[in-house]
Image: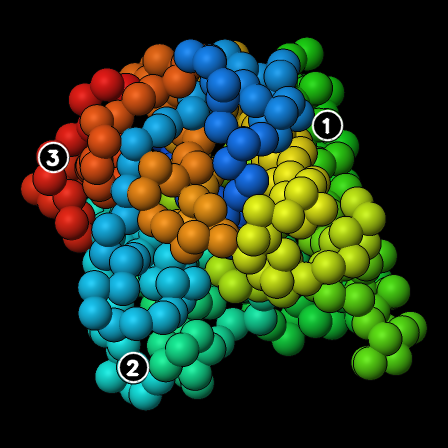
Amino acid sequence: MNPTRRGFIKGIAATLALPQLPSLHAAAARTAPPLRMAYVYAPNGVNLAHWLPSDNSNTSRTLAPLADLREHYSVIRGLDHSKACADGDGPGDHARANATFLTGAKARKTQGADIRLGVSVDQIAARKIGHLTRLPSLELSTDPPRRSGNCDSGYSCAYQFNLSWRAESTPAPAERDPRLVFEKLFGGGNTQRDAERRALRKSVLDSVWDGAKQMHGRLDGEDRAKMDEYLTAVRDVEQRIETAEKFRSEVPEDLRPNGVPETYSQHIRAMYDLMTLAFRTDSTRISTFLLAHDGSNRTFPEIGVADAHHQISHHQHKQENLDKIALIDKFYIEQFAGFLKSLRDTREADGSSLLDHTLIVYGSGIADGDRHNHDDLPVLLAGHGGGSVRQGRLIQAPTGTPMTNLYLSLLDRMNVPVPRIGDSTGRLEML
């Protein structure tokens, strides 16, 4: 590698995380891309009649937005979270659903500081492989963080607003502001300097743009296209965040929309795009995304649902409520489909896709919001895990299988084998 090229790489890498490009990193083309894992949580259960496949396939009315991705995901049935059941603790299913989803552990019922749960699957992985990347893990949400207070029938808000847990009494708070996530990934690491750059309306790309243009002609054709695509993607996310911030600053506090961007779909898209960029640049290999906390009463004006989600999830078998729940479920799946397409269409250094080397669990800790049941949960597994998962099917686990059995199998594929997680009883061998 000549000095000019080496200097460019050193300079741009100091400011901006780069994807692997064989022209710049000769070893990239010879090394298998790393595996990544993500967990996405959707609240309040689903309309099961629309969500579940009616035959031995991986599609349904709710999952229709995933039609051209069928070979990249599977529906898994038969997975339970029994530790989310009351077991003598009375009401509080929404708090327990959130708390148990990635831990498989029973939450101590308390609204005080003596919270106790368990380590979540993502943080088990982060302990073992987090040192390999700049960020051990990335926690995302569209809700503001909460770590105390009474949120659900005597359960601490910490359970309901945190999906990821570093220790029994220590949640890993999620970030809901796309700007802060963006700066964590692409900022210079100097808070004051980054703030000054934003005040001057400068892009994170400004400091590397001249060098990028100089090096552009020295990349081969394929890597030149990859670099252009990557820089465009970074700037696109940055501009959408700036637009959202401008809108927010011009609207009175009491009239500002839910979420940081103007609409909920824009907020979700920004977070999915940031997760894609984090994986693409190998800034982290582990991420979680809480779409909304369980029990959320968010409304969905974008799709014509003015009713509060939690409220109508207690549908009492009324068709009007069930129809609205189905619309919300499909809305979430549409956003998820956009995320999977982004991973599918992003190339690794060896020509494969990000989706080929990622494993994503999408699901809820409640099946039917009216019954608050935690068995046969709505779960999707997407991505190929480096070829270790056969997708495009309905996977029927034995009735009563702990969802943590799936997590053990996914950790094996991440080369993070552990004997058990929460209430696990073994591996899910049918992947």
Q: How is the image coloured?
A: rainbow
Sequence-earlier tag: 1 or 3: 1
Examine the rendered structure and indicate whether residue 314 appears above or below residue 91: above
Neighbourhood count class around disc 1 (C-alpha, 10 Å): few under 14, some 14–19, many 20 upward:
few
Q: Nearer the viewer, residue 45 or 243?
A: 45
Q: Which residue is mark 3?
A: 426
x 26%, y 34%: residue: 406
x 70%, y 19%: residue: 225
Examine the rendered structure and indicate whether residue 304 appears above or below residue 193: above
Q: Does the rendering let one see residue 13?
A: no
Neighbourhood count class around disc 3 (C-alpha, 10 Å): few under 14, some 14–19, many 20 upward:
some
Dot 1 lies on which element? helix
> Contact, CB < 8 Å: mark 1 with mark 2?
no
Q: Nearer the viewer, mark 3 or mark 2?
A: 2
What count of labels does the image hold? 3
Q: Is residue 388 left or right of residue 347?
A: left
Q: Which residue is mark 2?
A: 110
Q: Does the rendering let one see residue 421?
A: yes
Identify which amino acid the numbered label 3 is placed on: Gly
Sequence-earlier tag: 1 or 2: 2
Sequence-earlier tag: 3 or 2: 2
| Residue 228: numbered disc | 1
Q: Is residue 337 left or right of residue 419?
A: right
Identify which amino acid the numbered label 2 is placed on: Thr
The image shows residue 219 at horizontal and vertical percentages of 64, 19
Identify which amino acid the numbered label 1 is placed on: Asp
